[in-house]
Amino acid sequence: MDLFDTTQIGLERALSGSSMRQQAIAQNIANVNTPGYQRQDVDFASALHAAWDQGSSKVEAVDPAVKADPSAVMRADGSSVDIDSEAAAQATNGLQYEAISTVMKTRISILRSAIGAS
């Protein structure tokens, strides 16, 4: 029997993906005025969703990566970064990160209580 179930492993992978996305968004914001810069993003949610029904080993194998976003609209200078979209993405991702970490803390607290740790 494993100590951590698929949900806990999935939360860990989601937290890692959200952290990587925050870094990608920060890079996008830093390069908003760089001609030719292509927007970067991390899509971990679809990979987690696809792996979820296949068990914890598949969920654990999900490895989020930073990739260029081909769907981003290209500006006249060749850049595909929109500062307003990035600011919104940063706020949304920050809220998701906080929600994931709160759920993880609660689950760990329940485990600690179950084993009698304080």
Image: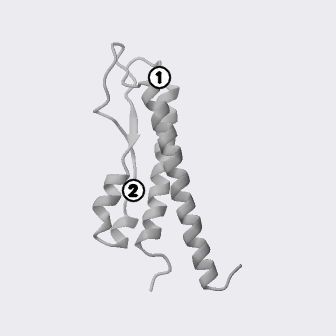
- Of the numbered discs 2 and 1, the one sitting upstream in the chain is 1
Residue at point 36% right, 14% down?
Answer: 77
Q: Give percent across and percent down for residue 37.
A: 40, 24
- Residue linked to disc 2: 63
Up-down: is 101 above or below 32? below
What's the distance in space between the residues labelled 2 and 1, CA to CA? 27 Å
Instruction: Residue 11 in the image: state x and y as whole percent.
Output: 46, 63
What crowding class fits label 1: few (fewer than 14 Cα within 10 Å), some (14-19), or many (20 or more)?
some
Q: What residue is drawn where x is 48% and y is 46%? A: 20
Q: Secondary structure at mark 2?
A: loop
Q: Could you tell me the amino acid type at mark 2?
A: Asp
Q: From the image, which quarter does the N terminus lie in?
A: bottom left
User: What is the three-letter code of the residue carrying label 1?
Assistant: Val
- Which residue is identified by label 1? 32
Q: Is residue 100 left or right of 72 when viewed as pictured?
A: right
Closer to the observer: label 2 or label 1? 1
To which quarter of the image does residue 108 belong?
bottom right
Q: Residue furthest right?
A: 118
